[in-house]
Image (tube, helix red, strand yellow):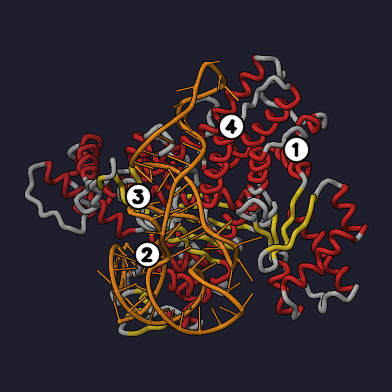
Amino acid sequence: MKDAITKIVLAAAAKAFDNGLLISDEFPKIEFEEPKYEGQGDISTNFAMISASVQKMAPRKIAEAVTSFIETAPEIGSDTIKSGLIKKVEIAGPGFINFFLCDEAWHSIIKRVFIEDKGYGSSDIGEKRKVQVEFVSANPTGPLHVGHGRGAAVGDVTGNILAFAGFDVQKEYYINDSGRQINTLGKSVWLRLLEQEGKEIDFPTNCYQGDYIKEFAKEILLEKGNGLLKKEESEAISECAKYAAGHILQGIKDDLKDFGVEFDQWFSEQSLFDSPADGSSLVQKTIDDFQSKEIVYEKDGALWFNTEKYGDEKDRVVVRSNGVTTYFASDIAYHIEKFDRGFNRVIDVWGADHHGYVQRINACIDAGGRNSSEQFDVILVQLVNLLRGGKPCAMSTRAGEFVTLKDIVAEVGKDAARFMYLSRSYDSKLDFDLELAKEKSNNNPVFYVQYVHARISSILQKAEDEGLISKQNIEWHEDLNTFINNLREKEEIKLIKILSLFGENVEKSAQTLHPHVIFTYLMTLAQAFHSYYNKHKVITDNKELSIGRLCLVTAVKKVIRNGLGLFGVSAPERM
RNA sequence: GCCCCCGUAGCUCAGUGGAUAGAGCAUUGGAUUCCUAAUCCAUGUGCGCAAGUUCGAUUCUUGCCGGGGGCACCA
């Protein structure tokens, strides 16, 4: 729709220039908006206003010059009007050019939805570029909690939206399974095990406090028997660690699957430290490389990365003076390795509490010869407040009393949980109310949107029962144009306009990496549908009109399904 | 002290370099012989403060104020 009008405006502007009414033939990129008020047309452009400085003319004068050729030039004006696109053009306010479109112009959208079907709303702006989205990446030292859920939903859906917008997306989970943390996990289990055997222990605060550690201690003793107790402590801890980490990781995988999240790759941090028989590890190679390029230097017995040169506030340690690498060392190697795998673009989803880390990862990427500002994005997801009926739930990790993602999915379901997580911009903290997520009312957005889908299914069922259509799944046929032509109600045109905006919302969501754009879109569409439903009956005595309306609501149903699909939320036939 | 996010209606939040800033909740009052009332309709003296850029700023810049988070040879 907008493409067609862009061509008309540019042609008219060129014509105006040829006739000496405009000074310059440099035209800006045409921008459109949907006017908020009736009387301002269907689509509006600020073309005249943003041309003002180039043309050195008052915006309204420019608008007049351009519109005179839209209206009068035979090769532009009469054709477009005859072709059933534009009804009239008006200049308004400071210089807006408002287009009033013919109903027929909107009717063609319904056909598009039918023809493109599951692909409606997709685009190729990604040009098949390879992009990796890395998210969750929680340490396998405990179950996922409510905060991880938000990162999981944001990462997963951002990936879905990018794929729909034409990117070649890979979803990855980085497993922090290198020695140190896993060792702490093993030690935690081992100490609990000794405690259960009646030994006096001193449980350090830096060990994992949760009850699940005690469970592991019981389980491993049952499985391995007393032989474990006779082993060297370091060996026993190592065995505890391996056992617990394996089980926790499997639990994380299961919980994510139940939440509707599937990764293309699980990437092990340990693999960056493992050396092949004929050489050194990736971490070592990267450090050596950077050292030879003087990006990494030695000071006070430690190795430092010159991140300050790349915009960080100070340099960071890569290898401590005791010879142990820092967490940062493997992150450098990992981010270099991502690009070496062929991704032109990398997106990391982190909790907002890690924002201080952004600059140093940018530094890694730039030092590695890539361009962090163009090829790397970090999505910082703000905190989640878990509520129950408006009151805060206790979720302190320290005390080990946190609500897990598994608990949430079990209580409110995958659909409600995902939708709730995506209902706000990740730039804002989120109040997640468990009672609200379970509520079956319009307080709860997921039901509001899903109900549209179910309601339309129900209408189609009835239409089939009454013999109006032969089957619920209407297939496109050119004869349907005649029926659709009956759609003349204000609410019908409004619904179609909203359907026409799905694609650009997907693009905006992909470009800004903000999945909640789709949430807002779906709410707007749902609102318009419910409103229409209450004002007009779809199935009436007028068969022609009824079939036209059935096409309209089917189109709505398809777009709702596509939108919910991006969110990984089901579109039920019945509720 | 420095860095990041937020500050929009009573509450929770959308939104935009432009024409009269929106939705849900809450409040009050309505709608169902009829395709699901898990719905709809009506009801609103609000962009934290101050400068700057601009033809035009709630939007961009800077400085303040307020809330949250982060600033290790930790992970």
Label 4 to label 2: alpha-carbon separation: 50 Å
Label 1 and label 2: CA atoms lie apart by 47 Å
Which residue shows up at 51% across the image and 82% down it? A293
Which of the marked residues, 4 or 2, is nearer the chain's N terminus?
Answer: 2
Q: Nearer the viewer, mark 2 or mark 3?
A: 3
Distance between mark 4 and mark 3 Cα atoms = 34 Å
Which mark identifies residue A354?
Answer: 2
Same chain check for tags 2 and 3: yes
Identify the mark nearer the N-term, 4 or 1.
Answer: 1
**Dot 4 and dot 2 within a common chain:** yes
Residue at mark 2: chain: A
- Expressed as whole percent of the image width and height from the top left, the position of residue B57 reads 52, 72
Q: Please tell me how crowded label 3 is: few (under 14), some (14-19), or many (20+) other residues with Cα within 10 Å.
A: some
* Side (left or right) of A16 relative to A320: right
Q: Earlier in the sequence, mark 1 or mark 3?
A: 1
Q: Secondary structure at mark 3?
A: strand
Amino acid beneath label 2: His
Q: Which residue is mark 4?
A: A535
Q: Which residue is mark 1?
A: A111
